[in-house]
């Protein structure tokens, strides 16, 4: 899908889509030194857009920047406001926001510390793993690529360069006929998808790798854990092996882009009944109500546009 929008926020102001350009000597283009976010906005009951967990996403952007020694030259509140303005200016009642802060052009060399540029784009984005995937579940494959070790990359940071690992895993899975890859950590335990956290359900208990595993501290992961707690579903944040995953009753992936997507098959093994299970469906249903502002207890997660 080719992205099209009217305006993009770049370095402090909204500019026409065609003018949001950078130089080919941009440091981030050569060395991957960008930090980014993916945020969704959904139409609320009145049809107006509401941004889901904006503060947490923008805070993670600043945390990512802090980890990689990058100083974002705008206060956090200004970037939050910019997200609202981008949606308004593009007249979007729902969509995906992509803030990106990166080392721009100037000096060359890995250690060059160039001026930091910031862009925020927004566009309508259908569910990442497909509408069909959301309803019926996807087929996934354990990747031949390993998720980064915690001291090889900074797993708490959402850094552009780290997505080469995700790209390789995702393309390998797609070229082999699967919808998504599942990456193991360097010890062989299940870590996450190329762009999603992963959960299994066994005997009514919800399990996901802990944040000490090399996984992104997903905001959808956090929302799902909160929803599960509220639904009184028992939770274990504990590592599991790939064969434990084969024997799960239910399996699903979470992410801003992927939302809550059931997994019906892994490595050609059917998971449970081979269709979205009851726990997955309850969580998915509550999640979609929450993001649309239909659940009063989660309204504080929403920022009106
Ligand atoms: N793990 C990874 C590696 C990851 O990239 C994401 C988000 C998550 C987990 C889930 O995090 P959260 O969105 O906070 O629940 N992946 C983003 C980018 C996808 C893309 O292709 O670009 C996203 O979902 O927006």
Image (cartoon, rainbow, N blue to C red):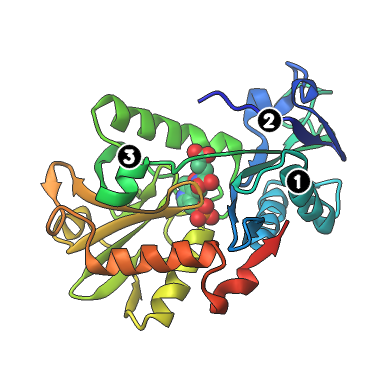
Disc 2 and disc 1: Cα gap in Å?
12 Å
Mark with earlier residue (2, 1)? 2
User: Front-most of 31 and 260?
Assistant: 260
- Is 173 situated above or below 24? below
Which labelled disc corresponds to residue 189?
none
Which labelled disc corresponds to residue 5?
2
User: In what element is the residue under mark 1?
Assistant: helix
- Is 1 situated above or below 60? above
Q: Residues within 10 Å of mark 2 (few under 14, many from 20)?
A: some
Q: Residues within 10 Å of mark 3 (few under 14, many from 20)?
A: many
Which labelled disc corresponds to residue 180?
3
User: In what element is the residue under mark 3?
Assistant: strand
Q: Position of residue 203 (x, y in %)?
A: 18, 74
What residue would you read off at disc 1?
A: 88
User: Front-most of 109 and 220?
Assistant: 220
The picture quadrant where one finds residue 10 is top right
The residue drawn where x is 60% and y is 48% is: 94
The residue drawn where x is 59% and y is 27% is: 3
Q: Position of residue 119 (x, y in %)?
A: 75, 37
Q: Position of residue 279 (x, y in %)?
A: 27, 69
Q: Position of residue 44 (x, y in %)?
A: 60, 60
Residue closest to the far top: 24
Q: Is residue 56 left or right of residue 183?
A: right
């Amino acid at each position: 899908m080719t992205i099209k929008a009217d305006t993009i926020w770049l370095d402090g102001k909204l500019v026409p889509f065609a003018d949001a350009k950078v130089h080919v000597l941009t440091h981030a283009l050569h060395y991957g030194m960008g930090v980014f976010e993916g945020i969704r906005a959904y139409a609320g009951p009145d049809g107006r857009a509401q941004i889901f967990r904006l503060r947490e996403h923008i805070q993670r952007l600043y945390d990512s920047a802090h980890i990689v020694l990058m100083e974002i030259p705008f206060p956090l509140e200004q970037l939050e406001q910019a997200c609202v303005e981008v949606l308004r200016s593009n007249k979007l009642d729902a969509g995906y926001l992509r803030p990106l802060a990166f080392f721009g052009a100037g000096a060359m060399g890995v250690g060059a510390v160039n001026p930091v540029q910031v862009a925020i784009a927004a566009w309508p984005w259908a569910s990442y793993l497909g509408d069909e995937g959301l309803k019926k579940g996807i087929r996934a494959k354990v990747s031949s690529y390993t998720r980064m070790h915690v001291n090889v990359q900074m797993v708490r940071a959402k850094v552009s360069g780290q997505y080469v690992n995700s790209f390789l895993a995702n393309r390998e899975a797609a070229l082999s006929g699967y919808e998504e890859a599942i990456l193991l950590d360097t010890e062989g335990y299940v870590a996450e998808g190329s762009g999603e956290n992963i959960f299994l359900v066994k005997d009514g208990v919800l399990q996901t790798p802990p944040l000490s595993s090399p996984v992104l501290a997903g905001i959808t992961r956090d929302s799902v854990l909160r929803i599960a707690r509220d639904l009184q579903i028992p939770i274990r944040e504990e590592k599991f092996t790939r064969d434990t995953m084969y024997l799960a009753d239910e399996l699903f992936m979470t992410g801003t882009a992927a939302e809550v997507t059931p997994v019906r098959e892994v490595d050609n093994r059917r998971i449970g009944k081979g269709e979205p299970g009851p726990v997955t469906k309850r969580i998915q249903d509550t999640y979609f109500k929450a993001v649309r502002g239909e659940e009063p207890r989660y309204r504080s997660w929403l920022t009106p546009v």
